Image: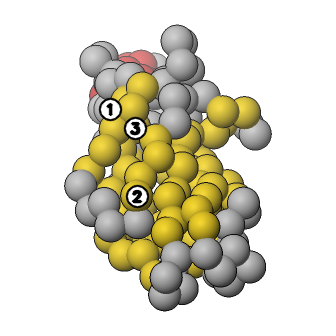
Amino acid sequence: MKKNILRTSIISLMMFIISAIPVMAQTKKYSYDLVVGGSETKYVATKAGGSSIENKYYVTQDFVAQPTGSTRYFSYHSRYKGNQVSNGLKLAENDRKQHNNTYHSGKAVANKSYKLYCKCTGNGHTTSKSTVTGKWTP
């Protein structure tokens, strides 16, 4: 009887400790191949948990390849269950800085998986694909 109580107490304590550990934000690499006007939603990552959840997501472009003589912009936002849940970012083809924007009110939920949406806009050679790679953190 005492062994069962002790075993149950230990298991309960372990479950409490495990559930109290915050999930760290995942930074994921991404790569899109898009024509002008094209968009895709993919690259799932989990929002960090814990007591002080941040209401932002981050995007950094590492590389862009587009046709010579063309200009490209890439627009990003976070999506959850197919819906846009954050304000968008629009980055120029040569922008390599880290950028962030906010989630819509109440939409940044700890331990939930979000997808990154990307749309390509620009001019010149609009039917040729452009490639953009980088990393993002929900």
Q: Which residue is mark 1?
A: 22
* Residue that appears at 54% across and 49% down: 75
Q: From the image, which quarter does the C terminus lie in?
A: top left
Q: Secondary structure at mark 1?
A: loop
Pinpoint residue 123: horizontal percent, then vertical percent: 60, 67
In the image, is 75 to the left or to the right of 98?
A: right
The answer for how far apart the CA atoms under marks 3 and 2 are is: 18 Å
Which image quarter: residue 48? Answer: top left
Q: Is residue 23 visible?
A: no
Q: Are marks 3 and 1 in contact (CB under 8 Å)?
A: no
Q: Which residue is mark 2?
A: 92
Tell me the tag on residue 57: 3
Q: CA distance from mark 2 to mark 1?
A: 35 Å
Front-most of residues 100 and 126: 126
- SS at mark 2? strand
Amino acid type, callout 3: Tyr
Please name which of the two marks, 2 or 1, marks the residue nearer to the observer: 2
**Residue 133: % across, % down:** 44, 72
